Each structure stands twice: as structure tokens, then as C-alpha cells.
Amino acid sequence: MEKINYQLKNRTDKVKLPTNLGFGQLFTDHVFEMDYDTVLGWHNPVIKPLENLSLHPATMFFHYGQAIFEGLKAFKNIDGDVVIFRGQSHLERLNRSAKRICIPEVDTEFVLNALKELIAVEKDWVPVNKGESLYIRPFILGVDTFLGVRPSQTYKFIIILSPVGAYYAEGFKPVSILVQDEYVRAVRKGLGECKTPANYASSLLAGEEAQKKGFTQILWLDGVELKYIEEVGTMNIFIRFKDEIATPKLTGSILPGITRDSVIQLLKSWDVNVTERLISIDELISEYKKGNVKGIFGTGTAAVISSVGRLTYKNETMLINGGNPDDLALRLFDEIISIQYGMVEDKFGWIFPVQTKEEFVK
Ligand SMILES: *Cc1c(COP(=O)(O)O)cnc(C)c1O
């Protein structure tokens, strides 16, 4: 692949981040972009100022949704170094999503390096306070100008960056969840395991209805029998039974979360019995009634760990651990955060350095 072409803005003002960053509202002022066509493959890599896209109204992805994305984070650790958490795993998942919807794969090593260069350009946008981070959103769109249904032959790959605030600004608050049995998110052998816009479009109505009823999130059941639990909104789910921590196995309709994988690896390293298996909603309810459900938590890049305080299915509401976060969820949260901010050793090789403090000084 060619060298990255730099078209940098002449920054006159120093970057000043607001105190309350929120999520996904503020964007840094450069992007990474590259193009694909069938002759050149991926080409024309460039880091350039963020600007609006200009696209023909017949651009294919507007009509048929041929698009994929990723969501990962960079942190400024306690030594002042910027690091990316599990970048390689996220890009490998991007390629798996790509394959499923006929998007050409990217060279993960090249993209990781491009990301590193982009973040180095935007280093002043990486927030420094604990809990804050730089959210990274790579995405790919099919951009042929054509109204027939077929895979596009040209694509655009873009990475945008957004400084985001601490998810738990008000503390580690357990969420209330509605088990959704009116709608389904995805089915096996469909698109459930891809990070593709269609999955989010299909979840919006159910999410809105649950919020009107006072719930924070929804727990999806499998799309065929509405019997097995799958995942929560944009998080995977773990149930702490008496002698086991179980998470739904990846059957094809569940998004294979990187945080899910990190949690499984951590629990194994702590000799906790963690299993990936089918968990029916009936099993969950009957175990709850026997007093065997000690905790429930969700996992995802945005919140890392989100403790579930209440779970409602039809007319039954389960109060989990008295509505309080369980100790294991808190321990996992602390451990992952500590790895991300460089407070404990990264035994798993999850941390990818972007630029050192010394390099910043130059
Ligand atoms: C992104 C996502 C997750 C969590 O994945 P992470 O890699 O842990 O961030 C879970 N479910 C859905 C539907 C998602 O989009």
C-alpha cells in the first residue's frame, strides 16, 4: 500500500475540550480516509481535515445499507502515553463483518498503523481525566452510483474520532432491562454477528417502546423460538449463577463483543468457572426463584461493564442482588479500566501504544 498522504489543517487555536464530553457529540478535526475500486484495491490513503461528504443521491449504501463499522477506544494512561485497547481484534472483526456483506477486507496492519498516525495528529484531543477516552469509529460504505441491487464495486473507508466522557459520571448505576418478546433483533445465519447499520435500525422501535415504559435497555431473545437469551442493546450479557458465570454462546445472531472476550479471558485467569452456552429465559427465571442468580451484567466498549439491577419478562420482575452491582462485575470493571489506564500489567497483550510522552514533547 502507498504511503499515507498528509493534508493537515493549519491549527491556530489550541484544542480545548469541554468539561462535560458526553458521548459521540464532539469530533476531532481530522479523519483518515481511503478508497477502493476493483482495479486499484484499497488506495489513496489520506489524513485530512474533517469535512462534509459530498455523495450522489443514488449512492448505493443510502438505499441498500451496504455498510459496516467498528467502535473502539484510545486512552491517555497514567504515564501520559496514548494507547489503543485491542485494536487488532476490532479490525479483525471489521473484516469478518465485511465478508458477510460483500465488502472488500482491509489490511489490518496497515489500518492499525494509519489509526496510530491519525491519533498522533489528534493527540491534543485525547482527554486526560480518568474514565474519559477517545472513541474511534472506523466505517466502510459502498459508494457506487447505481440503483440496481448488487454489491457496490467502489467503497470508502473512513475513521472519525470523538473524545468521550466517563460513562459512569454519576457512579456505577445498575440498569433496568426489559426482556423483549414483541420484536427480534437478528436471526441465526442473518446479520446479527456483523456490526452493520441494519441491526441498529431493527432495534430502534423496541428500544423506544422500552424507554417509554421506564427501562434503560432491552434484552433480546433468539429470533426463532424467543426462548434463549442473546444480548442487551449494544452489550453482551453475563449471568452469575451459583457456581458458574454463563454467557450466551455465539450462535451467529449475537455480536461477538471484544469486551465479552476480555471478560471471558480474565475470568479464566482468575479460575472462575465461565461457560458459553444456551441460556433459556425459563432457566433464568427458575434459577432466580431458587435464589441462584447472584448477578447479571452487560459488557461493551462504551460502558465496559454495566450492572443489571432489574430484569422484567412479561409480568415478572426480577430484582438482581437487591438492585446493587455485584462484586464480580465491579472487580471486572476495575481490572479492565486498570489495564486500559496502565495501572496494572497488560498480561494479555491488549494494549497497543500510539505515541509516547517523549514523542509528544517534540
Ligand atoms: C458493539 C456491540 C457489542 C459490544 O461489543 P464490544 O466489542 O465489546 O464493544 C455488543 N452487541 C452489539 C449489538 C454491538 O453492536
Image (spheres, rainbow, N blue to C red):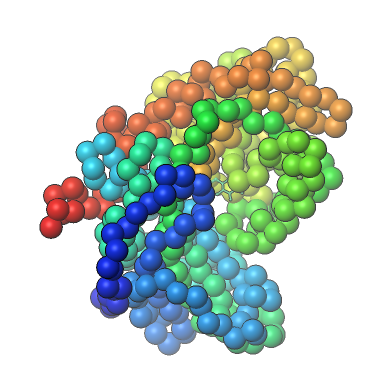
Picture quarter with the C terminus:
bottom left
- Taking the image as shown, residue 261 lies to the left or right of residue 64, namely left
On the image, the x and y values in percent for residue 224 come to 79, 47
Q: Mark yes or no: residue 226 visible.
A: no
Q: Residue at x 50, y 65 (%)?
A: 139
Please determine whether, in this image, residue 90 is positioned above or below residue 149. above
| Snapshot quadrant of residue 14 | bottom left
Q: Residue at x 53, y 28 (%)?
A: 172
Q: Residue at x 43, y 87 (%)?
A: 39
Which residue is nearer to you in this view: 355 or 154? 355
**Residue 286, horizontal then vertical, whole percent:** 77, 19
State the residue lying farthest toward the top.
291
Q: Is residue 194 visible?
A: yes
Where residue 155 sits: x, y (%)?
A: 50, 77
109 left or right, relative to 189: left
Q: Residue at x 58, y 28 (%)?
A: 173
| Side of 333 where 4 appears, left or right | left
